[in-house]
Image (cartoon, helix red, strand yellow):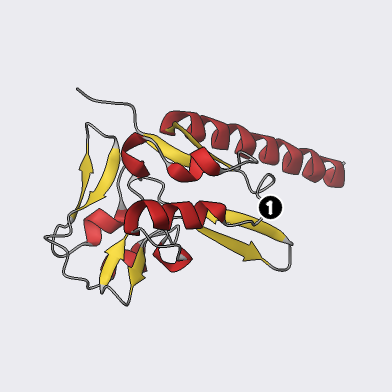
Amino acid sequence: MHNTNKVLKTDHNKCTGCRLCELVCAVKHDHVSNPTRSRIRVIKWEAEGIYVPMSCQQCEDAPCAIACPAKALSRNMDMGRVELDYDKCIGCRTCVSVCPFGAMHFVATDRKVIKCDLCDGDPQCVRFCDTKAVNLVDAGDVSLQKGREAAKRLRGADSRTSSLVA
């Protein structure tokens, strides 16, 4: 049975930078309270003064899976996610270098690559985020919302341009 692809949708306007998502992720996966082992990362954009939670977007045509020379990354159609097979992974970090979202990570102490696995459908980062800055949503909903936001920006730019021309 094919499930709808799910992704973590983040809202930087709601993120306080507490980084609890990083800690619960590391505890869930590696049983340690160490944010370097987290599959989600909170990046601070200093100039803007905002925090941006970043995680795997479970890309339809995942660059990480395409670039992996060991074929350790593939789409699990039933779970609707890109999965990493640790038995096949050779630790070359090609996936880390090609991910456009910076969502693949290499843990030097373990000499292994890590990525979000959506906690098998129950992401702990979503569960523990008090401000709801991280949510699990249908991938199509995110695409639709991004399209609407782009259209609004274009309309705004179009009206500014036409007022300059007039």
Is residue 115 visible to the viewer in this orientation of the structure? no
Is residue 34 visible to the viewer in this orientation of the structure? yes
Residue drawn at 62 percent across, 41 percent down: 130
Location of residue 75 in the rendering, given as x and y in whole percent from the top left corner: 23, 43
Residue drawn at 33 percent across, 70 percent down: 106
Residue drawn at 44 percent across, 43 percent down: 124
The image quarter containing residue 103 is bottom left
Hey, which residue is sitting farthest bottom in the picture? Answer: 109
Query: Which image quarter holds the C terminus?
Result: top right
Number of dots carrying numbers: 1
Location of residue 147 in the rendering, given as x and y in whole percent from the top left corner: 55, 34
Q: Is residue 137 left or right of residue 45?
A: left
Rendered view: 35 above or below 53: below
Rendered view: 149 above or below 30: above
Q: Which residue is mark 1?
A: 16
Q: Secondary structure at mark 1?
A: loop
Nearest the eye: 46 or 161 = 46
- Categorize mark 1 by other alpha carbons within 10 Å: few (<14), some (14-19), many (20+): some
Nearest the eye: 143 or 89 = 89
The image quarter containing residue 42 is bottom right
Rendered view: 131 above or below 31: above
Residue drawn at 52 percent across, 30 percent down: 144
Nearest the eye: 38 or 45 = 38
Query: Which image quarter holds the N terminus?
Result: top left
